[in-house]
Structures are given as C-alpha cells and as structure tokens.
Amino acid sequence: MMTLYDHPLSGNCHKVRMLLSMLGLPYRSEFVDVPNEAHHAPWFGEINPLRQIPALDDDGYLVCDSQSILTYLAQSHAPHWLGDTPQSHARVAQWLSFAANEIGNSLQPARLYYLLGEKVDIESVSAKGKRVLEVLDAYLAKHEWLAAERPTIADLACMPYVGLSREGHLPLDDYAHVMAWIERIVALPGYVTMKGLPQAAAQLAV
Ligand SMILES: N[C@@H](CCC(=O)N[C@@H](CS)C(=O)NCC(=O)O)C(=O)O
C-alpha cells in the first residue's frame, strides 16, 4: 500500500490525490500538519529533506514533489497520462514546469496570503497570478487539454491552484476557457474534490 504524506488543504497534494483516484490506486493518507509546523519534525526530514508535502512512499521508494509523483505514478501504471508522442511529452514537461514555477510562485502564494496570512508580496504575486490566468485562458481558447488530445498529468498538475484561485482573491469570472477546462476535468471518471474546488455531478447526487 502506498503512503501519501498529505494535507487536505494542499493543492499540491490534491494533484496526486486526483491521479491516484482516477487510476483506482489504493493508498494511505498520512496527515502532515504543515500549518502547525509538523513538517519540521526530525522524522519528516528523512521523508523529504526539503520538508514539503506531498511525498509518496511506494513500498520504501520515496518520491517528492507533486510533478515528480504524477510522473512516477503515470509511468508505473498508466503511461498514456504522460502523452504518447514526442510532441505531447514535450508539452507535458512544459506545463509541469509551468505548474511548479509560474503557478507555484503566483496563485499558490496568493491563496496562502489570504488563507493563512503567509508573508508574501501580495501585489507582485497577484499580478503574476493574473498573467498566469491570461496565458492559460488564451491557450485553452484553442485547446481542449493542455498537452494532448486527451487529459494528461499536465492538466492535473495545473488544475488545483487555478481552480482555487478565488481563495487568493483572483476570481475566474473573466476566464471562460479556464472555467470550461476545469469543468472538463471535474467530469473525468474518478475525479475527487477538495475544499474550494467543484464537486463532480455524481458526488453532488450522493
Ligand atoms: N514543488 C513542490 C511544492 C510543494 C509545496 O509547496 N508544498 C507545501 C504545501 S502545499 C509545503 O509543504 N510547504 C511547507 C514549506 O515549504 O515549508 C511540489 O510541487 O510538490
């Protein structure tokens, strides 16, 4: 059984939770209370020296960083989630980098500022976040999915902090193509939600 070092409010962990669910892979969620500094406990340094979640333990093999975990899980269980041409592989890598860098340095800290009062230059990250949403919206005006003709881990890597951007005071109302793309992800079999993200129709019906 795989163990995911996890927190329910973490968008980075949610990328992994979505793929695990979509692939039907059982796992154990190990709560790491990051807002209360649990990731600075000595034991967690053995799991991830960078002291960040998510981290995945697959039978003793440790993988850290959400993008890396998505890649590992897809390669191990469902390689079509990585794209199936050199072009789509390149696009997947491009959007994984966008998730870690552009999104990770804009929408993610903007949300942390308003949600947890984290010290960030809110003007700067908000401006970057707006730019991220504009770039995504323009791209999604012409593409159904980010990297291929079908969903890939690129979509899952970018979706959570984009879907949660309202919590960073960057609402999506002006980004119709981004909203439609989120709806397409929500409609995928096995989609799971988290606080702040839409629920799938089936989940609503229960
Ligand atoms: N690039 C990493 C970023 C992970 C990250 O920022 N994790 C946050 C929680 S969402 C964290 O553990 N923060 C604690 C810290 O950096 O001290 C990834 O994509 O997994």
Image (cartoon, rainbow, N blue to C red):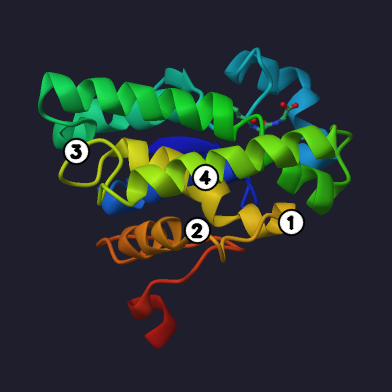
Question: x, y (%) of residue 163?
Answer: 53, 56
Q: Earlier in the sequence, mark 3 or mark 4?
A: 4
Q: Identify which amino acid the numbered label 3 is placed on.
A: Ala
Marks 2/4 in contact by CB < 8 Å: the verdict is yes
Residue 41, placed above or below residue 45? below
Q: Which residue shows up at 39% across the image and 36% down it? A: 2
Q: Earlier in the sequence, mark 4 or mark 1?
A: 4
Query: Which of the 4 quarters of the picture holds residue 108?
Result: top right
52 displayed left or right of 69? right
Q: Quadrant of the N terminus?
A: top left
Residue 170, placed above or below residue 36? below
Q: Which residue shows up at 37% across the image and 65% down it? A: 183
Q: In the image shown, does 178 or 81 lie closer to the viewer?
A: 178
Which residue, given by chain and number where applicable, does mark 2 sit on? 175
The local secondary structure at tag 3 comes to loop
Which residue, given by chain and number where applicable, does mark 4 sit on? 134
Which residue, given by chain and number where applicable, does mark 3 sit on? 148
195 displayed left or right of 79? right
Q: In the image shown, does 114 or 102 lie closer to the viewer?
A: 102
Circle nearer the viewer, 3 or 4? 4
Q: Identify which amino acid the numbered label 2 is placed on.
A: Tyr
Marks 3/4 in contact by CB < 8 Å: the verdict is no
Q: Earlier in the sequence, mark 3 or mark 1?
A: 3
Label 3: how many residues lie within 10 Å, few (<14), some (14-19) or many (20+)? many
Marks 4/1 in contact by CB < 8 Å: the verdict is no
- Looking at the rendered structure, which numbered label has been put on residue 169? 1
Q: CA distance from mark 2 to mark 1?
A: 14 Å
Circle nearer the viewer, 2 or 3? 2
Q: CA distance from mark 3 to mark 1?
A: 30 Å
